[in-house]
Structures are given as structure tokens and as C-alpha cells.
Amino acid sequence: MVYRTGDMVLYSVKEVFKNEVNDVIICQDQSSPARPYYTLIALKSRETAKTLLSIFERCPREMDEEPYIKCFTHKEQLCYLFPYNSGRSLTAFSEGQIINQVVREEVCINIVLACLSSPLPFPLLFLALHQEQIHIEKDNSIFFTPYFDLRELDKNMDEAACTRRCVHILLDILQRGSNKPLKSFDLLRKKIDSRSYRQLTELYRDIKVTALPKKKPKLFKRLRALWSYNKDRLFRILLVISIICFAIALTMLVSYLIFGDFALFRLFGGSIDQIGTEEINTK
């Protein structure tokens, strides 16, 4: 399948899935020398297309960018073109990557941050969370892929719904690998039971405040970091000391050449035995 929009010629490379409502396809732009990849969502249902259009038009989130690159029509389909990211599923990679409880809470914080920074409207953000389109980078940062099954699209899903869904995901992560519940787990469970979560910022604050402190680095790493931070200042201090030492040495050399000995040594080299005709130290 070939899709054309503007100066782009998009060749279908891989079909992620197909259903009666929408297809998700990985495409490559053959018109560009770089041959970049994109994720294409092609809507076959007119009702779903109208719903999605209204969601994007009435998106309450104030973002600087649209979540998609282009919107165009192909035959009778409405198409949305998204950036492509090679997936590293959180479900598949998290257990091998989360090595302790501190990292576990770090990943949870990054999930909430990804939700806060995502340009996706809340109904699509809810789908990303609900359909497990959550991916983890090697540095534990989080991103979403737009492999949406739009049969489950609900335009009424708001920030509160996204927050509650996110809490359930975090609880599942936090309760693994520990016999003793974390403070963050206890707080999130209590508040989700009372259905008090309405905003993602509130969720971020709670898990950030209750997260375990990161361990201090070992002594060698701290010394190396201290040296790296202060090396310029230490270099300047050593340079000044070297200049002073050089000036003293030069003064002593000139004194020796003129007076035949080192004048400074006479000042600091012992007591004064005679002043004029008077002897101070007598045997």
C-alpha cells in the first residue's frame, strides 16, 4: 500500500494490526533521502473519524505541538501520521531493568512525567495507558506509541480517568519485588480507594514526596565528582602558589648573586647575637 500526502510518498512496511474501525501501519517515506519511518493510523469508520476530529479540535490540554505530524485523506480513509519510535515495551523490559526499589519508584515517576508532557488529548492518553502502549528507554525514561485500537475510543475520558488508570499501573509496578510495601504504594492505594485523584500533578507530587532517597555514591565516585567540579579552582590556586614560590626563589637567587649569601636565611636562620658593640648572648 502506498499513501501520498504533499511531497511524501509513504510505503507500507509493516501492519501493526487491522480491524473494522482503524488500521495501524508502519510506513517509510521513499521521497526523502533519509528514508524516515512513521506510524500511520488509517480510520475506516466515519463515526470514529468524526469523534477523533472533535477530540483533537476540543483538546483542553495546552500544548505547543500537535501529537501528529499530518492529517490527510486517502481514498475514503482519514489518516493521521505520527512519529515512529522503536518500541521497548514496559511489560517486557521493566523486570530486567528495574534492579531495586529506588529504580522502581523512578520508573513510576517517569511514567507520570510522560503523561504530563504528552501532547495526546486525554481520550488518546487513556487508550495509551489502558492498551499498554507504554515503553521504557535504557535510561528508564518513558514514551508512548500511538498503536491505538480505536474501537475503545471514548471521548468522555478526561484527566481524572487518565490519572486513575495511571495509578493502577503504578500500583502494579510498586508492589512487585518487595515483601514490605513502599510508602508510595500505601499512599497511592489509600487515595485510589477513596477515588480522590483528579489530576496528574497531584499524583506526581504524592509519589515524588514518598519516593525513597537515592543512595549516595561511593567515596571514590564522590571524590572524582568533587575533583571534576573544583578542578578549575584548584588549578588557579596551584598556579598562584607556583608564581609565589618562583618569585621567592628568584629573590633568593638575586640576593645570593649580590650579597654572597641568602638574605632571607639571615632573617629567619637564628637569633641576633650582637647589636653594635653589645653582645646579647654571652657564654
Image: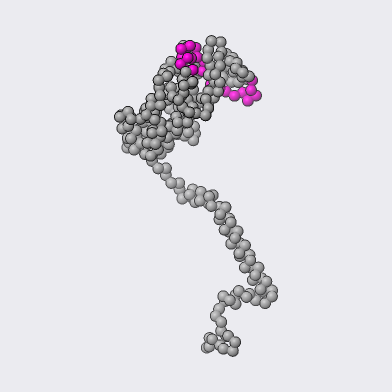
Foreground residue among 46 and 12: 46
* 132 w.r.t. 50: above or below: below
Residue 15 can be seen, yes or no: no
- Residue at the spot 63% in from the left edge and 66% down from the top edge: 247
Q: Is residue 52 magenta?
A: yes
- Residue at the spot 49% in from the left edge and 48% down from the top edge: 221
Which x, y percent locates residue 79? 53, 16
Foreground residue among 272 and 119: 119
Q: How is the image coloured?
A: one colour
Which x, y percent locates residue 77? 53, 12
Pick out the residue farthest to the top.
Answer: 76
- Residue at the spot 53% in from the left edge and 86% down from the top edge: 281
* 35 w.r.t. 176: above or below: above
Q: Is residue 109 magenta?
A: no
* 158 w.r.t. 214: above or below: above
Region of the chain picked out in magenta, as a range: 31-53
Residue 163 can be seen, yes or no: yes
- Residue at the spot 62% in from the left edge and 75% down from the top edge: 263
Which x, y percent locates residue 115? 44, 29
Which x, y percent locates residue 184? 35, 36
